[in-house]
Amino acid sequence: MEITQKLERFPVPKNEWGNYWMDQDINDRGIRIDQQLVNNAIRCQKNFHDQYLQVSQKLTGLANPNPPLQLKDWLHQQGVKTNSLSKAAVTQLLHTTTGTVHQVLSLRQLLSKSSVKKYQAM
């Protein structure tokens, strides 16, 4: 009750009520999505992911170059030492590497993109 009394001095503007009701309507019914677009985006990402993975496997000789520990070991064998394969670390390494190592790190960046995660949730 005390909060209500204090808030009564600050009425909600009419346009804000409009936003509130629109938000409630969206929450009640959801939003329309283009399911074909969603499915195609997921399929397209999977195709690119599979291609990038195959190239990365071929370049590194690793069955699965995704786990950081395996890739760090491979990088170490190539003369590149790193404690991390975070986005920032890979970006930094790309400035100092060339050839196959540079290509593998570029592929790692592409493989770690999560741009379709929201589509997959739909």
Image: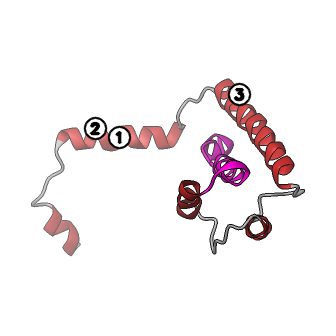
The answer to whether residue 11 is left or right of residue 28 is left
What residue is disc 1 on? 21
The answer to whether residue 88 is left or right of residue 7 is right
| Residue at x 79% of width, y 49% of height | 56
Q: Which range is magenta?
A: 97-122
Q: Is residue 79 above or below residue 34?
A: below
The answer to whether residue 79 is left or right of residue 15 is right
Magenta segment includes 81: no
- Residue 64 or residue 3, whichever sits in front: 64
Which one is in front in this view, the residue at disc 3 or the one at disc 2? 3
Q: Quadrant of residue 77?
A: bottom right
First reached walking from the N terminus: tag 3 or tag 2: 2
Marks 3 and 2, how far apart at CA: 35 Å
For residue 58, which numbered disc appears in the image? none
| Residue at x 69% of width, y 24% of height | 36
Q: Secondary structure at mark 1?
A: helix
Q: Secondary structure at mark 2?
A: helix
Cβ atoms under marks 3 and 2 closer than 8 Å: no
Magenta segment includes 112: yes
Q: Residues within 10 Å of mark 2 (few under 14, many from 20)?
A: few
| Residue at x 19% of width, y 74% of height | 2
Marks 2 and 1, how far apart at CA: 5 Å
Cβ atoms under marks 2 and 1 closer than 8 Å: yes
What residue is disc 2 on? 18
- Residue 4 or residue 78, whichever sits in front: 78
What residue is disc 3 on? 40
Q: Quadrant of residue 24?
A: top left
Amino acid, disc 3: Asn
Marks 3 and 1, how far apart at CA: 33 Å
